[in-house]
Amino acid sequence: MVSNASSAEGGAATDLGNLPRWDLTALYPSMEDESVQKDLARCQAESEAFEAAYKGKLAEITKRSGAELAAVVKEYEALEDLMGRIASFAGLCYTENTTDPKRQKFYGDVQEKLTAASVHLLFFGLELNRIDDAVLDAAAQDHTLSYYKPWLDDIRKERPHQLDDKIEQLFHEKHVSGAAAWNRLFDETISSSRYEVDGQELSIEPTLNLLQDADPEKRKAAAQALSKTFAKNLSTFTLITNTLAKDKETYDRWHKFEDVADSRHLANRVERDVVDALVKAVREAYPRLSHRYYAMKAKWLGVDKMNFWDRNAPLPKADNRLITWDEAQHTVLTAYSKFSPELSAIAKQFFDNNWIDAPSVPGKAPGAFAHPTVPSAHPYVLLNYQGKVRDVMTLAHELGHGVHQVLAGPNGALMAPTPLTLAETASVFGEMLTFRDLLDGAESAEKKRIMIASKVEDMINTVVRQIAFYSFERKVHEERRQGELTSERLGEIWMEVQVESLGPAIDLEGGYEHYWTYIPHFIHSPFYVYAYAFGDCLVNSLYAVYEEAEEGFQEKYFNLLKAGGTKHHSELLAPFGLDATDPTFWQKGLSVIERLIDELEEMDQAS
């Protein structure tokens, strides 16, 4: 029997210690438990009943009473929470082993049944948007409905892009056999792929991990293995990319989105010119950031030009010992506690209650994430912990997300979700707290230099690399409007943006042209990636405010996290004196990275 209840029994015993498996029983006892099917049936029945009770009547209800409409919204919210609980459980079960046929079927069946049920709820937002603003505003004077005003305002922003109910229903129903199916094909192809390194067959996470190995021959072997397998699957990835880009173009055209990224900007509740300013600032900073740093790193490694597999290589004299799970936990919780004991206490729940799935095992989804699930439950964190310093930073990052999700949860299923641009705030801030704490404890100038260099690399990966990814996506989606792109053309676009962003100190020849194939964000969430750069630059500015020891910073920070999706980024940043619409805002964030590189250069000259 495949059961997730057993996941929490102990963990994976390794050289890194006892790596925890998460316990999903807070959602459901197991995939086979009858409560899952009962709740799926309940979703269908209650959704149909909701539609029968309220479709075509919302305007009349709104005119009668704001409190009456609020009661309908609460009913809708309860259904969203129930469906979100089932969807979260199925998705988390699936990520544990995306190659397991039982999990694949369970995940697919749940998606289909939830799609069938949610069709009956589609009318709700569409019909609310047909109510006159004056009528809705008058109803929202009632305190029970005014609570949902941020959600109603967000729905209003969708109004210019909504279509007839039947057309929206068709898009909704086709998703499970369209984009969602291609997403699954990508996930299952990546998870089942193997990479031969020194005669050993590895899955993707351990292979990627070897790119950070101290042995240059191991890095080279891993890079070549990745290139070889990516090339073998190239036609599949090319078809997936072309199909999803066309699918998005069709959706955008029907919904009257002008720019290829406008639907993402709307979902993120951020203005296009704000993102354009961020992208422009980062691209202009490439020579001052990545180009300059990688030239330094090449010199440290004793070469004129690094191979692409040396980009994340540890520095000479770096401490390459494996960091145990217990040590990683202690490091992150200590850093969090120095900022705020409350922050650390919330993060500690993830360890104490088995909310984390840490080991890298065959079939498991690659990468890392924090999944908020639903407010009636709690978040979960997935890692592929390998014991490197970067893995500790990833833990700090994902726990930041987790804490944010816990604090935003009381807003309820409709208003707890945070736009991606602000969702990266707590995660990047958690990384910064951990880095600064470790840096303060550095025992020597050399150790400090290595730590600063490691942080600069992380920042370049978060800011420079992600904006390069965004540039790649823009070019792909824009060109796809003229017709299909060949594998060769996709590789050319990839290499163009990588050469521009990484600079002349890195040799990208020898298989790197296929590395676009494994980036999951391109597949699951087009144009997601700029949110990382947004978050990093924002947090750099936010941390500068914190370092000035302004009175009450922690309280303001917690208020930002607790707000969830109830406020625009301008409202949330105003208490800190920050404004993302200010053209100089991004320069402030980027200057933090620049100053760290300056510091490394000064250390070099002094040694």
Image (cartoon, helix red, strand yellow):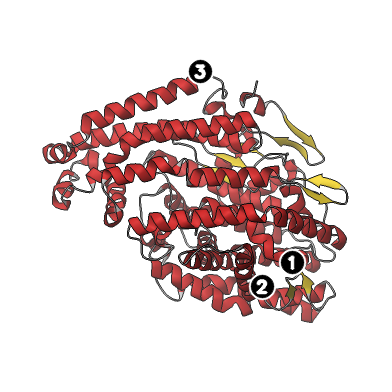
**Mark 3, residues whose alpha carbon is within 10 Å: few (<14), some, or many (≥20)?**
few
Above/below status of 548 relative to 389: below
**Contact (Cβ within 8 Å) of mark 1 with mark 2:** yes
Residue that sits furthest to the bottom in the current view:
605
Element at badge 2? helix
**Image-quadrant location for residue 71:** top left
- The local crowd at label 2, few if under 14, some if 14 to 19, many if 20 or more residues have their Cα within 10 Å, is many
- Dot 1 surroundings within 10 Å: few (below 14), some, or many (20 or more)? some
Q: Is residue 322 above or below residue 497?
A: above
Question: Can residue 545 be seen from the camera position used here?
Answer: no
The CA span between labels 1 and 3 is 50 Å
Left or right for 19, reference 78:
right
Q: Name the spot of residue 336 as percent of width and height, x first.
A: 60, 49
Residue 239 placement: quadrant? bottom right
Disc nearer the start of the sequence (1/3): 3
Q: Which residue is mark 2?
A: 502
Please indicate whether residue 137 sits to the left or right of residue 24 in the image.
Answer: left
Q: Amino acid at mark 2?
A: Leu
Label 3 – label 2 distance at C-alpha: 53 Å
